[in-house]
């Protein structure tokens, strides 16, 4: 257990402006010092100073929100040689007392790791942070594009009949090109002029978002090829799915085993047996972006990968449903990709 490896655990409850810090004795769990520090470079230096003054010896920082408000502090401490542990959001305490303050949350964060054998490390920065920014931006562009297409479809329903008949047989690309060239300025009919202007602006917005999404996809492919070319060599693994897998895995040693990676990706089997029926169900938890990437790869392999096609056919003949066969495939794929990443020299 970590309590046997450490002398002190420093819990941190992170927020936008202020971080609450609590230094806890690992052998006893007693609170030795508490402080509230600004979420800035000055506050990070003060946290390191307090740790040196009040927790000399073997120590580790247990930080909540290492992927959001605590990212700056976690990277600062890691750069200065401190051991940093990632703490998930703790469940609220039940019972009659529901006391909650930032200081109590920091103490709970520190004590939550004492009984664990190994806690995940925070995600690395560097190229992976660059990749995360590109993936997030692309997802935003795709969502905005989908919303624009839905708006365009609704606007076309109320467009002038002559225009609607003209556009009915066009493909999406030709439709967007035609709408982006509309000239509503010369129309005298106020209603038609407003509709045509809305159609033109909506079409141009969709075209701009399409160009943005393609540019981001090219950057993602280039960055993944530099960080983890082994992933792109796997059947059915595209650049976006590879990026999501790489972001969740982050770096070698962050997760203690491939079983932990399966739990993170929602691919760990959950027993759902009853009586003589023995079965397992899908895991609804974990990182849903990682789970989505695994699901996308499995669906792609079902079309192009002969071993996957043969496996699904065999399992369905044995009485498994297609959904259960896909669950098994996601678990096998999770294990294989974890081993590929762990043995590959991926630079941060």
Image (spheres, rainbow, N blue to C red):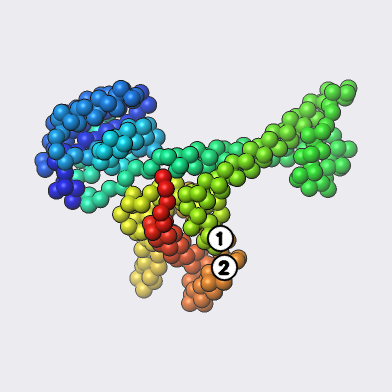
Dot 2 falls on a residue whose secondary structure is loop
Q: Is 330 placed left or right of 34 in the picture?
A: right
Instruction: Relative to 148, say whether 183 is above or below.
Output: above
Q: Secondary structure at mark 1?
A: loop
Task: Quote the CA–CA distance across marks 2 and 1.
Answer: 8 Å
Q: Residue at position x 46%, y 62% from top?
A: 333
x, y percentage for residue 140? 57, 38
Q: Is residue 160 left or right of residue 119?
A: right
Name the spot of residue 120 as percent of width and height, x first: 31, 47
Image coordinates for residue 198, horizontal then vertical, percent: 75, 29
**Camera-side residue of 150 and 46:** 46
Question: Which of the marked residues, 2 or 1, is nearer the chain's N terminus?
Answer: 1
Residue 138 left/right relative to 185: left
Asked whether residue 81 is in view, the answer is yes
Residue bearing the label numbered 2: 305
Q: Residue at x 32, y 52 (%)?
A: 253
Asked if marks 2 and 1 touch (Cβ < 8 Å), the reply is yes
Mark number, residue 236 = 1
In the foreground, 25 or 284? 25
Asked if residue 136 lies left or right of residue 25, the reply is right
40 or 346: nearer the eye?
346
Residue 65 visible? The answer is: no
Q: Quadrant of residue 107?
A: top left
Residue 60 percent location from the top left of the image: 22, 40
* Residue lying farthest to the left in this orientation: 28
């Amino acid at each position: 257990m970590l309590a046997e490896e450490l002398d002190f655990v420093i819990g941190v409850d992170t927020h936008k402006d202020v971080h609450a810090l609590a230094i806890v004795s690992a052998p006893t769990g007693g609170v030795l010092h508490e402080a509230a520090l600004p979420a800035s470079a000055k506050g990070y230096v003060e946290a390191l100073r307090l740790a040196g003054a009040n927790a000399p010896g073997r120590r580790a920082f247990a930080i909540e929100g290492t992927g959001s408000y605590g990212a700056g502090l976690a990277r600062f401490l890691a750069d200065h040689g401190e051991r940093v542990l990632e703490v998930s959001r703790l469940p609220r305490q039940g019972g009659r007392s529901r006391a909650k303050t930032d200081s109590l949350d920091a103490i709970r964060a520190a004590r939550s790791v004492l009984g664990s054998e190994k806690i995940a490390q925070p995600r690395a920065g560097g190229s992976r942070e660059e990749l995360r920014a590109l993936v997030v931006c692309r997802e935003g562009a795709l969502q905005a594009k989908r919303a624009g297409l839905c708006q365009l479809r609704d606007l076309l329903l109320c467009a002038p009949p002559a225009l609607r008949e003209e556009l009915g047989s066009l493909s999406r690309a030709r439709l967007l090109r035609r709408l982006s060239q509309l000239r509503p300025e010369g129309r005298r009919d106020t209603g038609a002029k407003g509709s045509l202007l809305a159609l033109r602006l909506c079409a141009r917005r969709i075209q701009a978002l399409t160009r943005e999404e393609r540019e981001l996809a090219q950057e993602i492919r280039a960055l993944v090829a530099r960080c983890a070319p082994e992933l792109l060599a796997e059947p059915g693994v595209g650049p976006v799915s590879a990026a999501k897998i790489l972001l969740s895995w982050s770096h070698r040693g962050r997760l203690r085993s491939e079983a932990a990676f399966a739990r993170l990706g929602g691919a760990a089997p959950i027993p759902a047996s009853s009586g003589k029926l023995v079965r397992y169900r899908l895991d609804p938890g974990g990182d849903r972006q990682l789970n989505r990437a695994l699901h996308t790869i499995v669906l792609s392999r079902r079309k192009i990968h002969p071993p996957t096609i043969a496996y699904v056919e065999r399992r369905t003949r044995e009485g498994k449903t297609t959904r259960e066969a896909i669950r098994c495939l996601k678990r096998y794929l999770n294990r294989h990709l974890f081993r590929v990443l762990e043995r590959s020299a991926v630079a941060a």
